[in-house]
Image (cartoon, rainbow, N blue to C red):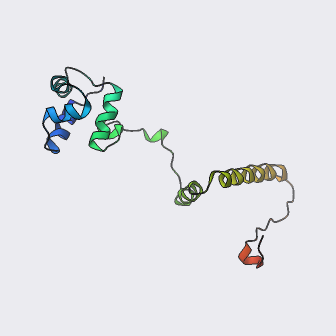
Amino acid sequence: MIRIENKLQYLRELHDLKQQEVADALGVSRSTYANYESGRRSPDIDLLISLADFYGMSLDELTGHKVKDSHAMHLSQQALRMLKSFNQLSRPIQEWYIAHIDFDAKTSHTLAGTASPAIKFETVAETGQQK
């Protein structure tokens, strides 16, 4: 059971709201909401989502949940920049890049252990031509 009753009261008072105002926003009775604040009842997941939306925060922030670092993915700044740029591309262009990355990865595995020629990538600016 999630114990967030103190957080609910804190957030309500921080925003200078009455229990009735929060209850009305959530579509529950004041007594039901009062039971959440007192810990006599626990809000279900749908109500937790509504509360998080109401206060403009994530469920993790609302419930105090902390993600363990062992599950967190750490990316370099370069990787984050690449992902941000990639996400700004249209879906067909993303698929094109993925296909080429897959091909390059397979090719590098095939060439592993052999004397592979240097691969040079030229940009339009380097060649002075339109492709």
78 with respect to 115 (left or right): left
Q: Residue at x 12, y 36 (%)?
A: 18
Residue 73 to residue 41: above or below: below
Instruction: For the N terminus, give its image quadrant.
Output: top left
Residue 7 quadrant: top left
Looking at the rendered image, the quarter that the C terminus falls into is: bottom right
- Expressed as whole percent of the image width and height from the top left, the position of residue 56 reads 30, 44
Q: Position of residue 9 (x, y in %)?
A: 17, 35
Residue at image location 65% in from the left, 53% down from the top: 94
Marker count (numbered)? 0
Q: Name which residue lies at 76% across and 67% down.
A: 121
The residue at the far bottom in this view is 128
Residue drawn at point x = 26 percent, y = 23 percent: 42
The answer to whether residue 31 is left or right of residue 48 is left
Residue 45 is drawn in which quadrant?
top left
Where on the picture, by quarter, is residue 127?
Answer: bottom right
Q: Position of residue 39 (x, y in %)?
A: 20, 24
Residue 106 appears left or right of 19: right
Q: Is residue 119 above or below residue 127?
A: above
Determine whether 59 is above or below 101 in the image. Answer: above
Q: Position of residue 63 (x, y in %)?
A: 30, 34
| Left or right placement of residue 54 versus residue 89 in this view | left
